[in-house]
Image (spheres, rainbow, N blue to C red):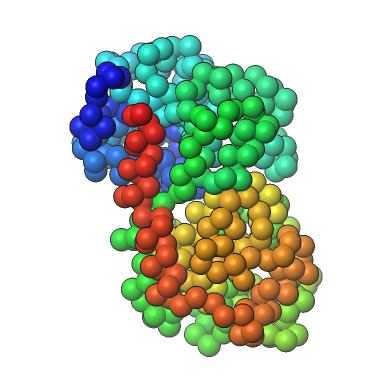
C-alpha cells in the first residue's frame, strides 16, 4: 500500500473468511458477508477467499475464491487452502483482512510482507471449541498455541466487536492495546426494520395472535443458555401461563432441549422452529414481544440484539461478553443480574408483567439505526484496514 494512498479512493482488499452466508448460517459468516458487500458498494474491489464458496460471480466488485471444500478432512482442507491460494494470486492488494485463524494459518508465510494485515477477532476459538466439546482433530492447546498465536503474531492490527473481546485478545493472547480497534457489528437497517405490526408479522408466520411471545435465534449449543431459559420459563409459567417461546436454529443439543421442554411440561409453551430462512428473521423479530439472549459465555457482540432492535423489538440479555455494551445505553434494566436461572426468570417475569418499563418500538429502531448502521460501521472498518 502506498503511503500517500487516499483512503477515499477505491482500494483492493483481500479478505479471508470461512463459508458463504446464507448457505452457512452463523454470526461470523453473516458479518463477513455484510462487510464485503458494504465495501464493494463503496467501489472497493474485494476478493473474498474461503471454504465452500459459490463458484458463480455474486457481485462484479466481489471476487469469490473458493480454496477448499468444507466436507474434506481437516489436514487436506488446510493443504488445499494453501495450494489454491498460491495458484490464484494475481496482483497485490492494498490491505489484507483475516477473520479465522485456522484458515489463515496455512497462508501466513505467502502473504505479501509489505501489505498491512488486519485480523477481525471474533472470539477465542480454542476456548470456544473446548466449551462446546467439538470433536475436532486439533487439540485445544494446538489451536491456541500453534494456530491462533502464530496467526496473531503475523498481524499488524486487530478489530474486535466489543471491549469484552478486546480484553480477551489482550489478556489471553498478549496483543498490545495499541493494535486493537473496537468497532461493533452492524445491521442492515433496510432489511431489519419495524415495518409491520406484531399482529401482521404473526399472521404471516402462523404464530399465536393472543399470547406473549419470546423469540431467540441461536446455534443450539450449551454456551448460549437455552437450557437455562427453559428452566426459567417453567418457573414463571404459573404466573404467566400463556407465554410462548419460539426457538430458531439448529445444533447438536436440539434433541436434549426438546426432551427437557417435555419434562418441564412446556410442550404448549415452546416451539422449536429449526432453521429459519434468513428472509423470515425480520418477521420473527417483529412478531415477538421480546427477544431473549440467555448466553452463558463467549458472546463477543450479539448480532441478534441489534437485528431485533432494528425491527423494533426490545431484547433481554445476560451480562455476558459484549451484549451489555449494546443494551446499557438503551435500557440497562433489560440486562439480567447474572447468568443464573433465577436471574433470568426474575427479569423475564418483571418484563412480561409490565413492572419494568421497556423502550418503544420506535426507540429500539432508532437506537439501532443510529449506532449500528452497517454503512457507517463498514466505513470505520475500512479506515482501519487502509490505515
| Quadrant assignment for the N terminus | top left
Q: Measured along the vertical axis of the image, is residue 55 above or below residue 149?
A: below
Q: Where is residue 82 in the image (x, y as percent from the top left)?
A: 46, 16
Extreme front residue here?
178
Q: Position of residue 259 (x, y in %)?
A: 74, 64
Q: Which of 13 and 153 is in front in this view?
A: 153
Residue shown at 39%/25% (left/top)? 96
Residue shown at 39%/80% (left/top)? 197
Q: Nearer the viewer, residue 260 or 194?
A: 194
Residue shown at 30%/39% (left/top)? 39
Residue 95 lies left or right of residue 215; in this view the side is left
Residue shown at 61%/45% (left/top)? 164
Residue 331 lies left or right of residue 30; in this view the side is right
Q: Where is residue 353 in the image (x, y as percent from the top left)?
A: 64, 85
Residue 345 lies in quadrant: bottom right
Q: Measured along the vertical axis of the image, is residue 248 above or below residue 118?
A: below
Residue 386 shows up from this direction? yes
Q: Measured along the vertical axis of the image, is residue 282 above or below residue 10?
A: below
| Quadrant assignment for the C terminus | top left
Amino acid at each position: 500500500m502506498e503511503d500517500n494512498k487516499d483512503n477515499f479512493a477505491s482500494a483492493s482488499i483481500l479478505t479471508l473468511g470461512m463459508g458463504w452466508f446464507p448457505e452457512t448460517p452463523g454470526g461470523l459468516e453473516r458479518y463477513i458477508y455484510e462487510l464485503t458487500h458494504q465495501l464493494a458498494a463503496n467501489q472497493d474491489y474485494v476478493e473474498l477467499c474461503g471454504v465452500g464458496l459459490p463458484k458463480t460471480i455474486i457481485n462484479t466488485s466481489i471476487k469469490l475464491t473458493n480454496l477448499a471444500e468444507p466436507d474434506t478432512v481437516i489436514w487436506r482442507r488446510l493443504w488445499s487452502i494453501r495450494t489454491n491460494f498460491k495458484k490464484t494470486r494475481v496482483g497485490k492488494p492494498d490491505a489484507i483482512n483475516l477473520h479465522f485463524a485456522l484458515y489463515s494459518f496455512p497462508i501466513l508465510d505467502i502473504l505479501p510482507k509489505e501489505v498491512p494485515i488486519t485480523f477481525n477477532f471474533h472470539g477465542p476459538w480454542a476456548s470456544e471449541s473446548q466449551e462446546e466439546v467439538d470433536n475436532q482433530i486439533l487439540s485445544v492447546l494446538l489451536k491456541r498455541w500453534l494456530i491462533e498465536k502464530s496467526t496473531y503474531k503475523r498481524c499488524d492490527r486487530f478489530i474486535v466487536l466489543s471491549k469484552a473481546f478486546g480484553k480477551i485478545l489482550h489478556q489471553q493472547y498478549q496483543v498490545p492495546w495499541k493494535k486493537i480497534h473496537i468497532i461493533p457489528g452492524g445491521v442492515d437497517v433496510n432489511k431489519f426494520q419495524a415495518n409491520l405490526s406484531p399482529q401482521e408479522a404473526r399472521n404471516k408466520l402462523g404464530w399465536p395472535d393472543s399470547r406473549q411471545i419470546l423469540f431467540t435465534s441461536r446455534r443450539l449449543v450449551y454456551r448460549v443458555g437455552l437450557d437455562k431459559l427453559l428452566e426459567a420459563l417453567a418457573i414463571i409459567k404459573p404466573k404467566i401461563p400463556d407465554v410462548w417461546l419460539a426457538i430458531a436454529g439448529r445444533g447438536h443439543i436440539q434433541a436434549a432441549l426438546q426432551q427437557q421442554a417435555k419434562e418441564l411440561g412446556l410442550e404448549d409453551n415452546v416451539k422449536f422452529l429449526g432453521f429459519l430462512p434468513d428472509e423470515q428473521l425480520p418477521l420473527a423479530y417483529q412478531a415477538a414481544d421480546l427477544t431473549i439472549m440467555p448466553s452463558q459465555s463467549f458472546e463477543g457482540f450479539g448480532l441478534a440484539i441489534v437485528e431485533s432492535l432494528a425491527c423494533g423489538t426490545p431484547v433481554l440479555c445476560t451480562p455476558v461478553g459484549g451484549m451489555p455494551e449494546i443494551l446499557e445505553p438503551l435500557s440497562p434494566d433489560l440486562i439480567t443480574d447474572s447468568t443464573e436461572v433465577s436471574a433470568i426468570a426474575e427479569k423475564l417475569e418483571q418484563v412480561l408483567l409490565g413492572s419494568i418499563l421497556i423502550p418503544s418500538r420506535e426507540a429500539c429502531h432508532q437506537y439501532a439505526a443510529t449506532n449500528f448502521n452497517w454503512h457507517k460501521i463498514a466505513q470505520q472498518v475500512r479506515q482501519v484496514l487502509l490505515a
